[in-house]
Image (spheres, rainbow, N blue to C red):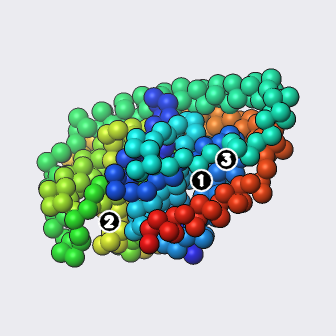
Amino acid sequence: MQKPRFYLGANSPEGFYGYFQKAYEPDWKVWLIKGGPGSGKSTLMRRVTELVPGSWEEIRCSSDPGSLDAAICEEKKVMLADATSPHALEAGCPGCVEQLVDLGEGFDIAALRRNAESISCLAGENKALHRQAVHYLAAAAQVQRVRMERAADKLDHEAVRSLAKVWFQRMDLQNEPCGRVRQRGLCAVTPEGVLCFEDTVSLLCDRIFVLQDDWGAAAPVFLACLCDALNAVGCGHTLCNCSLFPKNKPEHLLLPRSRIAFVTGNHAHPFAMEHGVNIDLRDMYGAHRPGTKDALQRILAQETHLLEAAAGCMYQARLVHDELERYYISAMNFSFVQKKTEKLAAEICAAVE
């Protein structure tokens, strides 16, 4: 069965930024998985989601979207998470909430130490490439900030907020239970470029509204207004911020229980969905346009170039990481991982009965 995919962290202009600690509550059961690259953490999590019944979310790794950073089952209040760098999760309430799973016990330590110099060099090269990617992302964010500030000066903020209130009134939320705000990432800069999980939106929502906003100042205001209205009535929702501004720029909003989604469509993620309904925010700038179409295209070209440069660094970093993994894979006892996986799955089943 297809599982919804999200990110819980990604490279940002300030370095790696994640929402891992905010993904669970004190009444959850969380397993933090430790181990080096290639130790089977992602395989373990994927296999547990197969062995333990439930509606699981796959939290993908933005540095390698084919791998898992975590797996979450909201209905059972269970989370499995890769607790190694760069997220480096630590237990806040060991035993009460979080438990550690150490796959490092399966390493042939002597074999790893024989290759310590090569491993150390590759690890350093990987970190350096990610630092370069962060510099490019910081530059891209600066260009985007210029675009948004230029547009914000021309934006009719009150008209955007009024439109958001109209759409909030149109949503039928009478059957929507109270809940918490979940923070997730739907789009991120990856080694494959800007990668968005459009299939997750289609999987979770039937009514999809695409906010068309070339200049990028109107959609965040619209979504922030919707979030304020939802918070005022205590309605739970999933908020996805922009990976370039992960602290304060809303980009997508999902209400899976009501199967409603508002997503931002722009040059980086067009969201050309068959069943999506466009909400055109381009008229919200009134008669005073932020600039000409040519001016917008020049700014977008600069952003695109910098995002591509960041993705290129991350692609090179993944190649280095793959080489690093080979040393660990050759030193790993995977029968140990298999036994650990089966034991963990049984432990989770018993814990949530």
Tag 2: Cα neighbours inside 10 Å, few (<14), some, or many (≥20)?
Answer: many
**Quadrant assignment, res 118:** top right
Q: Amino acid at mark 3?
A: Leu
Q: Which residue is mark 1?
A: 68
User: Which one is earlier in the sequence, the residue at label 1 or at label 3?
Assistant: 1
Q: How many marks?
A: 3
Q: CA distance from mark 1 to mark 2?
A: 24 Å
Which quadrant: the C terminus?
bottom left
Q: Which residue is mark 3?
A: 103
Q: Amino acid at mark 2?
A: Leu
Q: Looking at the picture, how far across and down is residue 165, in whole percent?
A: 15, 59
Q: Nearer the viewer, mark 3 or mark 2?
A: 3
Judged from the image, the secondary structure of the residue bearing numbered disc 3 is helix
User: Which one is earlier in the sequence, the residue at label 1 or at label 2?
Assistant: 1
* Dots 3, 2 in contact, CB < 8 A: no
Q: Looking at the picture, how far across and down is residue 190, in whole percent?
A: 59, 44
The residue at 52%/74% (across/down) is 53
Judged from the image, the secondary structure of the residue bearing numbered disc 1 is strand
The circle drawn on residue 18 is: none
Q: Which residue is mark 2?
A: 255
The residue at 26%/62% (across/down) is 179
Q: CA distance from mark 3 to mark 2?
A: 36 Å
Q: Nearer the viewer, mark 1 or mark 3?
A: 3
Q: Looking at the picture, how far across and down is residue 94, in whole percent?
A: 44, 44
User: Which one is earlier in the sequence, the residue at label 3 or at label 2?
Assistant: 3
Q: Looking at the picture, how far across and down is residue 237, in whole percent?
A: 30, 60
Q: CA distance from mark 1 to mark 3?
A: 15 Å
